[in-house]
Amino acid sequence: MTGRDRLTRLADFLFEVGMLRKTPRTGYQFLGSGAENVAEHSFRTAVIGYVLAGMGGADPLKTMALCLFHDLHEARTGDFNYVNKLYNTCDDKRALTDALTGTGLRENILDAWDELESRATPESVLAHDADQLDLIVNLKEELDLGNRYAAKWLDCSLERLKTDEARALAKSVMETDHTDWWFQGPDRMWWTKKNGKE
């Protein structure tokens, strides 16, 4: 990518980020149900990070940024699930560095990557918990839909949480039916009224 100006490299970068929409999260093949791509995962992880940071008195925007970029390298490497990682290795940081070269974003995003990997700041610990919580929310939905194997995965995922905020939110997730937010709605009668119309 040498010889390309910054704006062209930024355009390249945005196209590359779009690859995350086409990059499946591969663990669901073992679960037998459920599916998502890396972009979907990163989006909700960022929202969860924002929420956790607010609960824990950390910087919400910084936590959200750590979450948003945590899997950016997977546009180049793909997503390695836990079984894949037993047999394959990849250089995540090199993939991210190459993706950012010439964009003018390299220093800031690589600094965020290093912070995330260090798990030395409240924001980085919360970002890792947000990553797990996104999986927990997905698994709870699969459990509600009848996949009994999701319970085994949930046990493992819940154990990985490090912060009180994440554990408290996970407890609430586990106690809440995934359909309550829309089925019970602001006015349950909308089901019979056809969205308020008689």
Image (cartoon, rainbow, N blue to C red):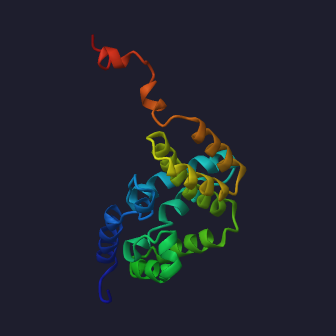
- In the current view of this chain or complex, which residue is farthest to the bottom? 2
Image quarter of residue 161: bottom right
The residue under the point 32% across, 67% down is 19
* Residue 28 in view here: yes
Q: Is residue 178 left or right of residue 119?
A: left
The residue under the point 45% across, 63% down is 27
The residue under the point 50% across, 47% down is 148
Residue 185 percent across, percent down from the top left: 44, 25
Vertical relation: 82 (above or below) 187: below
How many marks on residues? 0
Residue 149 percent across, percent down from the top left: 51, 52
Residue 38 percent across, percent down from the top left: 41, 62
Q: Which of 46 and 62 is in front in this view?
A: 46
Vertical relation: 184 (above or below) 50: above
Image quarter of residue 103: bottom left
Residue 29 percent across, percent down from the top left: 40, 61
* Residue 61 in view here: no
The residue under the point 66% across, 61% down is 125
Q: Nearer the viewer, residue 46 or 176?
A: 176
Q: Which of 77 and 65 is in front in this view?
A: 77
Q: Is residue 28 left or right of residue 85?
A: left
- In the current view of this chain or complex, which residue is farthest to the front? 148
Q: In which quarter of the image is the C terminus?
A: top left
Q: In which quarter of the image is the N terminus?
A: bottom left
Vertical relation: 124 (above or below) 146: below
Vertical relation: 152 (above or below) 180: below
